[in-house]
Image: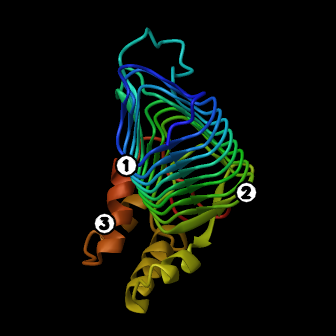
Amino acid sequence: MIHQTAIIDKNAMIEDNVEIGPYTVVGPESVIKSGTKIHGQSVIEYAEIGNNCEIFNFSSIGKRPQDLKYQGEKTKVIVGDGTTVRECVTLNRGTAAAGQTIVGKNCLLMSCAHVAHDCIIGDGAIIGYSTGIAGHVEIGDYAILSASIGVHQFCKIGKSVMVGAGAMINMDVIPYVTVHGDRAVLVGLNLIGLKRKKIKLSEIEDIKSAYKILFMSKLTLEEAMSKLDKSRSPYVEDITTFIKNSQRGITRPAKTMVG
């Protein structure tokens, strides 16, 4: 059902079984897929919203990026199936750099969260209340960012990471760990998250061992990586691949022996 006060651009594509609430604006080049519910007074443009999503009141999806280099290039936002966007969330479309901002499937973006241009958020991620994610950030599958977090542009946060409330992320965060603090530091593994995913205890032990080698030994990072490259664990490989691809450097514990 589309409320009679909603404004739908002639170029928007609305599939069957979509509900659009009062005073919502669906702008040009928008696609709203089946089963999605959009609450009243939201604004959506240059966006593709997947199946069975729910967009709550006053959300803004697909407005131009807050980047002074943006010159009106044709870009968009993609929101995956089953994702929930709560009240007053802003999702800016991409710039010429990447062309699109992507939010994965079955994510939850809590009220007042902001996702800037050219970000990639993996499946099942949770972005907490009033958390701000700057441009070009990548967040892995099932990562959880608590409330009032700030993420610096170009940072990468690995899969299944837990970030404590109020943290400021200015370096990359390897998969499977927990971080918190004004300038975020590692405080251990995200064991609760790993157990919730039903990862085998033997595999969790592999991750623990990798963490100790990286951050609790007297090895340099190069030496630690060389040792971990021999591991056959796919979870350890996630960590080593992440570190090799890091361009900002990785977040470490407050006191570390790694060189």
The Cα atoms of the two marked residues, 3 and 1, are separated by 49 Å
Identify which amino acid the numbered label 2 is placed on: Ala
Does the CB distance between marks 2 and 1 fall below 8 Å?
no
- 73 left or right of 2? left
Q: Which mark is residue 220?
A: none
Q: Tell me, yes or no, if residue 127 can be seen here.
A: yes
Q: Badge 3 local density, few (<14 within 10 Å), some, or many (20+)?
A: few
In the rendered image, which residue does mark 1 sit on? 34
Q: Badge 2 local density, few (<14 within 10 Å), some, or many (20+)?
A: some
Identify which amino acid the numbered label 1 is placed on: Ser
- Name which of mark 2 and mark 1 comes first in the sequence: 1
Does the CB distance between marks 3 and 1 fall below 8 Å?
no
User: In this rendering, is residue 110 above or below 9?
Assistant: below
Tag 1 secondary structure: loop
User: Which residue does the image show at 66% across and 64% down from the upper left?
Assistant: 255
Identify which amino acid the numbered label 3 is placed on: Ser
Query: In the rendering, at what x and y percent does residue 204 appear?
Result: 44, 83
Query: In the rendering, at what x and y percent does residue 107 appear?
Result: 50, 56
Which marked residue is nearer to the observer: mark 2 or mark 3? 2
Query: In the rendering, at what x and y percent does residue 153 appear?
Result: 54, 34
User: In this rendering, is residue 188 above or below 251?
Assistant: below
Query: In the rendering, at what x and y percent does residue 117 appear?
Result: 48, 30
Q: Badge 1 local density, few (<14 within 10 Å), some, or many (20+)?
A: some
The Cα atoms of the two marked residues, 2 and 1, are separated by 35 Å
In the rendered image, which residue does mark 2 sit on? 165
Q: Front-most of 201 and 44?
A: 44
In the rendered image, which residue does mark 3 sit on? 226
Tag 3 secondary structure: helix
User: Which residue does the image show at 38% across and 84% down from the upper left?
Assistant: 203
User: Which residue does the image show at 65% across and 32% down from the upper left?
Assistant: 41
